[in-house]
Image: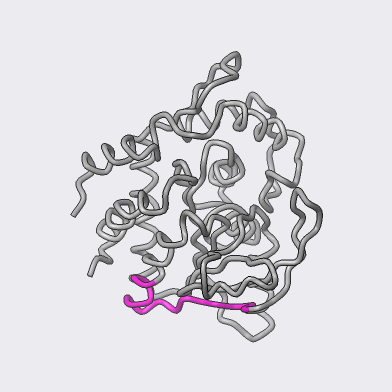
């Protein structure tokens, strides 16, 4: 069992919170693009409210603990570990509630290189608790806009967790999947589930477009987000996203293992 104090220490030591690798410039650029409603950073969210750059900076200072000073424009960003712990507690509570009700769940990640193991462990635990872990749209093609133009990707699943791959990469070897912010894969997955007559997920767990895309469609969604991903925190503020946990989403994959143990224990899903 990992105590809250030990978790807090790990967050700081691993760079998951405290001073993180995401630059202030990256974060401010994302806030500027979000204020302009650039689809690259909206992640499938269609906010009800008008969000200016100043509004977003104040929101992210409140949700993540970044500096709220608009004149602070360079250096590395900061995440308050207390906010991360609170977010993980809320995240675990939602998982525990889903397990208690044995609801269908969909997992998906745009960060398979870093976060796949974290989600796989949660999917295994919810499956063992009696939840149906859904895998709709396996092998379906999705055209996603990337910095190299529109590229076709395939939806795939690794032990119950959805991701996208470039065609021709089997996944049986070294390539865990592609980094993606797009909400199109979760839309395709939900469309496929509906076409087949159900069931639809009552909870979506993941990051990026998987969370915002599902939340925008009215499905309960929880996930992890960095300081340059304001969409999840806007979604949480507006009610489309149930829980957004602030942390660095790009550290080594093994650094998330203590978070897995903590979340499963808090959700009463440890085995």
Residue at 28%, 57% (x, y): give it: 261
Q: Residue furthest right?
A: 149
**Magenta residues (range):** 124-138
Instruction: Specify how the rendered protein is coloured.
Output: one colour
Q: How many marks?
A: 0
Q: Nearer the viewer, residue 27 or 96?
A: 27
Q: Nearer the viewer, residue 24 or 64?
A: 24
Residue at 33%, 63% (x, y): give it: 96
Query: Residue 233 location, x and y as percent?
Result: 55, 42
Residue at 76%, 41% (x, y): give it: 38
Prevailing secondary structure of the magenta residues = loop
Q: Is residue 181 above or below residue 23?
A: below
Residue at 61%, 55% (x, y): give it: 179
Query: Residue 75 location, x and y as percent?
Result: 53, 22
Residue 132 drawn in magenta: yes
What quarter of the picture does the C terminus occupy? bottom left
Query: Residue 100 location, x and y as percent?
Result: 33, 70
Query: Residue 113 location, x and y as percent?
Result: 51, 57
35 horizontally vs 212: left or right:
right
Q: Residue furthest bottom?
A: 196
What quarter of the picture does the N terminus occupy? bottom left
Q: Is residue 49 above or below residue 78?
A: below
Residue 98 drawn in magenta: no
210 horizontally vs 101: left or right:
right
């Amino acid at each position: 069992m990992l105590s809250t104090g030990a978790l807090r220490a790990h967050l700081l030591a691993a760079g998951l919170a405290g001073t993180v690798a995401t630059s202030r410039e990256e974060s401010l650029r994302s806030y500027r693009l979000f204020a302009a409603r650039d689809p690259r950073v909206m992640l499938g969210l269609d906010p009800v409210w008008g969000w200016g750059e100043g509004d977003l900076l104040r929101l992210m200072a409140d949700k993540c603990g970044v500096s709220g000073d608009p004149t602070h424009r360079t250096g590395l960003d900061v995440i308050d570990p207390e906010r991360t712990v609170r977010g993980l507690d809320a995240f675990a509570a939602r998982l525990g509630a889903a397990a208690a009700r044995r609801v269908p769940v969909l997992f998906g990640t745009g960060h398979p290189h870093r976060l796949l193991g974290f989600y796989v462990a949660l999917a295994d635990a919810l499956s063992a608790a009696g939840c149906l872990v859904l895998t709709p749209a396996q092998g379906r093609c999705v055209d996603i806009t990337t910095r190299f133009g529109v590229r076709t990707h395939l939806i795939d699943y690794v032990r119950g967790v959805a991701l996208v791959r470039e065609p021709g990469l089997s996944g049986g070897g070294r390539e865990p999947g592609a980094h993606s912010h797009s909400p199109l894969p979760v839309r395709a997955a939900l469309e496929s589930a509906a076409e087949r007559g159900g069931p639809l997920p009552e909870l979506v767990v993941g990051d990026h477009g998987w969370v915002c895309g599902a939340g925008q469609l009215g499905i309960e969604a929880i996930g992890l987000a960095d300081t340059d991903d304001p969409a999840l925190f806007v979604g949480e503020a507006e009610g489309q996203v149930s829980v957004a946990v602030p942390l660095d989403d790009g550290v080594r994959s093994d650094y998330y293992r203590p978070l897995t143990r903590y979340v499963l224990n808090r959700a009463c899903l440890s085995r």
